[in-house]
Image (spheres, coloured by chain):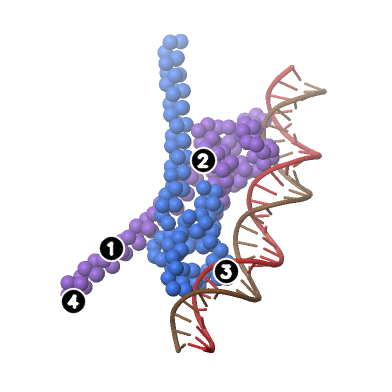
Chain colours: A purple, B blue, C brown, D red
Amino acid sequence: MNRLFRALADATRRDIVRRTLVADVSVSQLADSYDMSFAAVQKHVAVLEDAGLVTKEAHGRERMVRGNLARIRQAQLLLDGFEELWRSRIDRLDILLAEGDLASPGT
Amino acid sequence: MNRLFRALADATRRDIVRRTLVADVSVSQLADSYDMSFAAVQKHVAVLEDAGLVTKEAHGRERMVRGNLARIRQAQLLLDGFEELWRSRIDRLDILLAEGDLASPGT
DNA sequence: CTCTAATACAACCATTTGATTGCAAATTAG
DNA sequence: CTAATTTGCAATCAAATGGTTGTATTAGAG
């Protein structure tokens, strides 16, 4: 999870994910789009690959990069878990309020 | 977004978010839970606060930390956007297939 | 075969991160 | 008032990050 979220914490990498989710793109095609060296883009792709967010497939001398939605879903699941926890806080407040309602009439 | 995802890319910080989504917790209560110095935990909370994932509220000499679900939702929205993009890839394939269907019968 | 394009990888550098310790300030407890 | 808690903040340090350039390898074009 650390690597997953860290990989998403960079605008260039998020853009690469966006593009490779829509269509396969070669590393050099990606490199042409950003104002940095080929090697820098190559490293970003490597970070994404290490995080499982993209895969690479050799096609001749090119490596086609493909976004991996399954991995994105894992991040979504974690955030969904946060949302559920938050709801449990509301539930606790409801319980407290309910207890208050029970106590008040008695006084 | 960079700060948001970077803040989530650390297990200790994700745990702090979990705990503070369920109930308000003071910085020192948090510090007691982790095997690191008070200052280190304080810094993690500061990173989360900077990312908008938690807020702090003074209560006497304690600062109660509270998780901010709204900010988590922003991360969810971004990931949801990825998912929609991915679906658009499928749509394009469908279009290609449909075009193929139109062409094939004519040949 | 030769040249070029695409990629991989290493070395290097500046900046950021994640942790530490130490000290000061504010608030509560006794 | 005095002492203990809680927090904030600065200085410091090792490791990771994000970028660079240079070199080597591999595959397609002519």
Residue position for label 1: A94
Q: Is residue B99 visible?
A: yes
Local packing at callout 2 (Cα closer than 10 Å; few below 14, some 14-19, many 20+) is: some
User: Dividing the picture into quarters, in which one does residue A2 lie?
Assistant: bottom right
State whether discs 1 and 2 lie on one chain.
Answer: yes
Local packing at callout 3 (Cα closer than 10 Å; few below 14, some 14-19, many 20+) is: few
Q: To which chain does the residue with label 4 belong? A: A
Q: Nearer the viewer, mark 4 or mark 1?
A: 4
Residue position for label 2: A68
Residue A22 horizontal/vertical position (percent): 50, 33
State whether discs 3 and 1 lie on one chain.
Answer: no
Residue that appears at 54% across and 47% down: A8
Residue that appears at 59% across and 38% down: A56
Q: Amino acid at mark 4?
A: Thr
Disc 2 element: loop
Q: Amino acid at mark 1?
A: Asp
Residue B85 horizontal/vertical position (percent): 46, 35
Q: Give the answer, above or below, for where B38 lies relative to A30.
A: below
Residue B35 horizontal/vertical position (percent): 55, 70
Residue position for label 4: A107
